[in-house]
Amino acid sequence: MDEIKQLVADIKQKKLKPIYLLMGEEPYYIDKISDYIEANVLSEEEKGFNQMVLYGRDVTIEDIVGQAKRFPMMAEYQVVIVKEAQELARTIDKLVDYAKQPQPSTILVLNYKYKSVDKRKAVYKTINKTGLVYESKKLYENQVADWIRRVLSPKSYTITPKAAQMLVEFLGTNLSKISNELEKLQIILPEGTQITPDHIEENIGISKDYNNFELRKAVGAKDAVKAHKIVKYFADNPKDNPMVVTVSLLFSFFSQLLHVHGMSDKNPRNVAQALKISPYFVDEYLTAVRNYPMKKVSANIATLREFDVKSKGVGANAVSQGDLLKELLVLLMS
């Protein structure tokens, strides 16, 4: 995020580059940077003649170069934005000659989403020298809750660890979807609010009591009554709670428990660092380690592998996902 802030600060100060290659697996920041350039480099009066948005599926590299070589009309710059530039992956090398001597009065923005230009290629090296390359990397799931807190912080909002975890569990690592939900909450809730699981449940529709996060906690604590209540809820609402997601989360959980068992120093701080989790959740893991010896953890990992296959319809076509989950719980907690 520091790199983003610096990039935006430079654009504000008119420290502009002739080419911006915005690439990578995470589209959220590619869109944010591109939208900021589109909204702020030119005045509204200048945009009519000097700002053009192209789409990679509709144009060739020659079309882009032709537009980029034009001179601005009654403005210092023209802005050419190429969205979905990854559609030009096979011919992107043809841009190298323009990139060597780009038009100084043109700001060319290439939105190259979901993948990256090969850093060994001449076009990458040339743009990196004469322009700016920003690589937007996908966040790991264990990084997203911290990202949520950092996004909310400048806006005077905070969020509890459980509420952040609920968003991650429900929306995964899709930063655009998470950002949209956070914006909704900021419209509804007054500035300075700490966002809680109740706010998430009331305004986004994610159950605070019946979710994979709570199931993991119940299984770890060997709270069979609560775990079976959650599984019954999942069985009644299979579309919102696909078994494959539940099995994946439990597999990850028991794999982490195996890691903790292998640690010589199980100090809470060490456990949080080793598992890359919030200190808020460490007690949950330490409780589970006490409840599940290493041998049982290993057996549960094998069981979860078996049920992962079954959850995808292999060898269990006639069995409902609800019944599979109930069977899985019995095996895990016995």
Image (spheres, grey):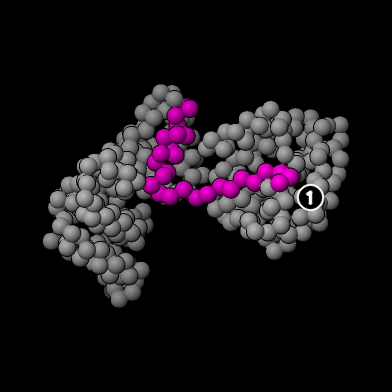
How many residues crowd mark 1 within 10 Å: few (<14), some (14–19), many (20+)?
some
Residue drawn at 31 percent across, 48 percent down = 274
**Lateral position of residue 152 relative to residue 285, left or right:** right
Q: Which secondary structure class fits the magenta region best?
A: helix
Q: Quadrant of residue 4?
A: top right
Single out the residue that lies furthest toward the bottom. 315
In this rendered view, identify the residue nearer to me: 222 or 196.
222
The residue beneath circle 1 is: 100
Residue at 80% x, 54% y is 97
State the residue in front, 231 or 270.
270
Identify the image quadrant of residue 121: bottom right
Q: Quadrant of residue 144?
A: top left
Q: Is residue 191 magenta?
A: no
Residue 155 picture location, percent across and down: 47, 27
For the point 81% across and 56% down, the residue is 62
Region in magenta: 129-155
- Examine the rendering and report whether any part of residue 57 can be seen: no
Residue 18, position in %: x, y? 75, 41
Foreground residue, 160 or 273?
Answer: 273
Residue 10 shows up from this direction: yes
Number of callouts? 1
Q: Circle 1 sits in a helix, a strand or a loop, which is it? A: helix
Residue 133 forms part of the magenta stretch: yes
Q: Is residue 248 above or below residue 140?
A: below
The outermost residue toward the front is 264
Q: Is residue 324 depicted above or below 181 in this figure? A: below
* Disc 1 residue type (three-letter): Lys
Residue 197 x, y percent position in the rendering: 32, 37
Picture coordinates of residue 259, whole percent (x, y): 27, 55
Question: In what quadrant of the picture does the C terminus appear?
Answer: bottom left
Q: Is residue 302 left or right of residue 12?
A: left
